[in-house]
Image: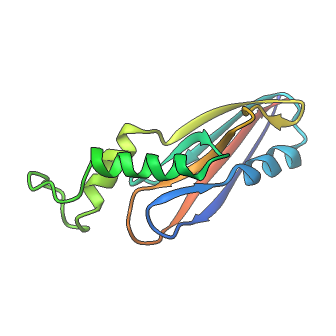
């Protein structure tokens, strides 16, 4: 059994979904591992990871809108406000989604559905540099 680990930086432009499926595909291809499990982990608490449809951009618009309505800024009962009005809502959104995803690898490729893409879901308004760790174990 072999293991490969690497990290990548995703530059966000503020809130939204940022597709990095191609970068995962390159990582898996370059590893030489044919069968295994890729783990994707984001090292932050105010963004998250999603596997979501990559064909219709309206899906991203609707997801972003849903989370803005579900966890709006300006909730006056929040205590953690030091880093701005979007920070605690971003932490809540990250808690409702995920910071780690496991993706099977077969034939040297991530096993994703036809319309599935891998996204970093940025919950903060201002741009950030997000670090994502990619780990692959297999043969």
Quarter of the image with the C terminus in it: top right
Left or right of residue 32: residue 103: left
Left or right of residue 60: residue 36: right
Tell me, yes or no, if residue 43 can be seen here: no
Taking depth in this image into account, of 88 and 113 the one nearest to the observer is 113
Taking depth in this image into account, of 96 and 134 the one nearest to the observer is 96
Taking depth in this image into account, of 117 and 136 the one nearest to the observer is 117
Left or right of residue 137: residue 66: left
Q: Quadrant of residue 46?
A: bottom left
Vertical order, 13 against 88 (above or below): below
Question: Residue, x 71% and y 49% (percent of image)?
Answer: 21
Quarter of the image with the N terminus in it: top right
Vertical order, 85 against 53 (above or below): below
User: x%, y% of residue 101?
Assistant: 58, 36
Vertical order, 99 against 81 (above or below): above
User: x%, y% of residue 19?
Assistant: 63, 54
- Which of the colour schemes (rainbow, by chain, secondary structure, one colour) is used? rainbow
Tell me, yes or no, if residue 73 can be seen here: yes
Question: Residue, x 28% and y 62% (percent of image)?
Answer: 86
User: x%, y% of residue 60?
Assistant: 52, 50
Q: Quadrant of residue 51?
A: top right
User: x%, y% of residue 11?
Assistant: 57, 68
Q: Residue furthest left?
A: 77
Question: Residue, x 89% and y 32% (percent of image)?
Answer: 34
Question: Residue, x 54% and y 50% (percent of image)?
Answer: 58
How many marks can you see?
A: 0
């Amino acid at each position: 059994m072999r293991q490969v680990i690497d990290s990548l930086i995703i530059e966000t432009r503020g809130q939204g979904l940022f597709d990095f499926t191609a970068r995962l595909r390159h990582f898996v291809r370059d590893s030489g591992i044919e069968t295994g499990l890729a783990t994707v982990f984001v090292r932050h608490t105010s963004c998250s990871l999603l596997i979501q449809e990559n064909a219709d951009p309206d899906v991203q618009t609707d997801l972003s809108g849903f989370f803005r309505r579900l966890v709006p800024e300006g909730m006056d009962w929040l205590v953690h406000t030091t880093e701005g009005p979007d920070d605690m809502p971003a932490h809540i959104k990250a808690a409702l989604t995920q910071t780690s995803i496991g993706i099977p690898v077969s034939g040297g490729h991530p096993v994703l559905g036809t319309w599935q893409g891998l996204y970093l879901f940025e919950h903060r308004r201002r741009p950030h540099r997000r670090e994502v760790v990619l780990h692959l174990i297999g043969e």
